[in-house]
Amino acid sequence: MFSQLLEIFTSVAFYAAVIRLTAPLLLSAMGGLVAERSGIITFGMEGMMLMGAIGAAVGSYYTQSVLGGLVFAMLAGMFLAFLYGIMCVTVGANQVVSAVALNLGALGLSSTIFALVFSNKALGVVTEVVSVPSMRPVKIPLLGDIPILGDILFNQLPLVYIAFLAVPAVWFVLYRTTIGLKIRSVGEHPHAADTVGISVVRVRYLSVLFTGLMAGLAGALLSIGMLNTFQENMSAGRGFIAYTAIVFGKWEPFGILLGTLLFGLADAIQLRIQALNLPIPYQFWVAFPYIVTLLALVLFVGKATWPAASGQPFKRESK
Amino acid sequence: MLRLQESTNRWEILYRRFLERSFNILIPLGAILAAFVISSALIVARGANPLSAYAALFAGAFGSSNALANTVTRMVPIIMTGLAVTYGYRSGFFNIGAEGQLFMGAMATTWMGITLTGWPAWLLIPASLLAGALAGSLWALIPGYLKAKRGFNEVLTTLLLNYITIQLFEFLIRVDHAVGLGHPFLAWIGLKDPTQPFPKSAYITEAARMPSLTSLLTWLGGTAEDPAFQRFTLAAVVAVLAAVVIYILLFKTTTGYRARAVGVNPRAAQYMGINVVRTTITTALISGALAGMAGSLEIMGFQHRVIQNFLVGAGYDGIPVALIGQLNPLGVLLSALFFGALRAGANRMQIVSGAPVSIIYVIQSLAILFAIAGTVIDLRPRRLKQAEIEEAKRLEAELALQSSPATGTDILGEEARHV
């Protein structure tokens, strides 16, 4: 048994899987971080991811190209994000509740669209195995030839690279640009930001749309990246895990990277270890990533500083 | 003169209250209607006629005694989870974990029904229900304790616990159940029927099942020819009673008053001398018990055993049920009727019109969005609005406890903010 475990933990494929499984969470969490810093709770990423997954499958099917799939995925994610923006910014409703409603809506809408597009017209149900064009790994020249590390890091799907590159990019935008300053000020002191002429409404809308775009890409990574089809509720809580990673990472890009890697690691472990026939039940390993996340939250995350205006609708007259 | 003035004022207040109340009902009704109208676009896209699709939906929910039995059966668990969410939400504990607590309740109740097979019905039925309630409460105690004592956001912890609970369930329905001492602990708590190869439990003993309309009629000396009568059980009565009890608890007792005060503003509640930590834990226990009983009633009243995917999503459905019900226990009954009917009629809709079942999720989602948007945006006539602004100052203290609670934020505001 020990040798089998050793085999897993020393295999290149295992670490490549960790990177691959981390990527959708990271994409989504980086998008979510931006909206979070502008004062919007991104509990709706689950639904945006699911919309991205169906968008990618449909887009890839109609255009017969992965790129078309990605464009559709981003649009689908942003569509739900726009609705979320209306609820959170314009209406000023409770954000968590709106998110719960939209997540439910995305579950229904994605399955309905899947049935509409792919079902057998006579029977009204999806009868054939749906297979659409999907992403292929791209080996990066030179870097991909590095022994071991090349296979783990530089022979992945294109979106995986984008996910990891998003970490320094988001960090740079948030802390080194005027746009980032605006986003953060809107999340911390919306009224002060308003006084100096920043449009709180516009910044929050754009931030949420960015979340939709990134969560949509994360969904695409699930449907046309890791598979070549759509499955009902295929996000399976990953949007919530991405949200947890944001809290875990204390709203800092590199902390979030750590949080998503932890979950990616747990996910990769459960996938490999299930095959081992250990005297520990299979279901424990399925629950393992969630147990790890819960324990990590409870045991290691101390006092977190939420963006001060998090979850609060902005109203001018309520100064 | 003065008397007259007062009495007009009083009538005016009553009139305004009446309008306020009717808006409480009109908003969800309008929201539901709007949701149906918009969702019909999806049915048109499918090439079907929305009106005939909705007619089939209605017929599938209310068209026959069988359809009605389906609707009532679907209603029972979501009334309970809707109440769980309502009580929690009003009291500052946003219980997303009703799903997991429901599974715990179902497992505990099933365990009673397959283990204590010798017990008489008058003892076993309440004991099984209590076991489910206890299991749900204990499961809710974890996020309740973490929130109250350590400031962890309950939305995250309950959500993660759901995924873990489902796997615990999946595991236990694969462990052969053994009755009696002297067996390993795992076999003792396992739920699988050892005589069957499939991951499901044995049927609970006859005495643990909720009496049905058929058995009532037989007991009264009559006969019930309609087989659908077997599915109208005491479980539905228990669910309705629970709604009344929670209404009284929430709005007519000190416990409920304290809980709502914490829900509106935990810090202010603490200044008022309310023990916020204890109140939060009590809220979690009550909310968890209700969700646990949702599982119990499903098992005792309808399915009589646990099986893989026996009731997926009823816990999450509690959230929209509570919200459309305007976070009022009696409103929950009405909104559960809407949701139960949607679920019961969906299959017939798909068969008759070809509109996919998943459309009902879209309808539900839109209905919630419109309902919460309608509550936030003031749709009342301007004249009424202005009159209310004047009135509001006087009623502020009272109304504060009825308006939207500060749920989802942390227990003592920013300073104590953890996860």
Image: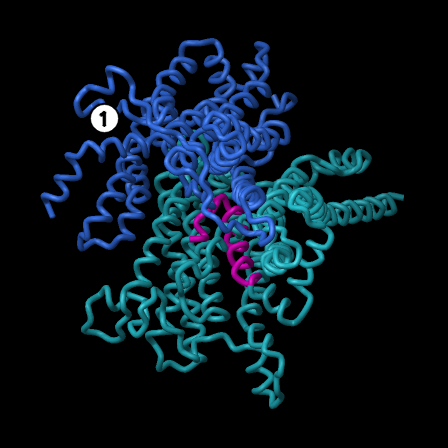
Q: Is residue B251 visible?
A: no
Out of B13 and A247, give the one closest to the viewer. A247
Residue extending furthest toward the right: B1
Q: Is residue A163 left or right of residue A99?
A: left
Q: Quadrant of the N terminus of chain B?
A: top right
Say which colour chain A has: blue
Q: Residues within 10 Å of mark 1 (few under 14, many from 20)?
A: some
Q: Tell me where the magenta segment starts and ends, as one range.
A: B74-99
Which residue is labeled 1 in the image? A151
Residue extending furthest toward the left: A3
Query: Where is residue B227, by image quadrant?
Result: bottom right
Query: Where is residue A13, by image quadrant?
Result: top left
A271 part of magenta stretch: no
Q: Quadrant of the C terminus of chain B?
A: top left
Out of B121 and A27, give the one closest to the viewer. A27
Who's the residue at 25% across and 75% down the image?
B180
- Give the percent coordinates (x, y) of residue B359: 60, 48
Query: What's under tag 1, amino acid-wise?
Result: Asp
Out of A255 and B93, give the one closest to the viewer. A255
Is A209 drawn above or below residue B243 in the view shown?
above
- Give the percent coordinates (x, y) of residue B112: 36, 71
Say which colour chain B has: cyan
Q: Could you tell me which chain the residue with mark 1 belongs to?
A: A
Magenta region, main secondary structure: helix
B79 part of magenta stretch: yes
Q: Is residue B209 left or right of residue B331?
A: left
Who's the residue at 19% across and 53% down the image?
A277
Out of B250 and B241, give the one closest to the viewer. B241
- Give the percent coordinates (x, y) of residue B327: 59, 49
Q: Is residue B401 visible?
A: yes
Residue extending furthest toward the bottom: B221
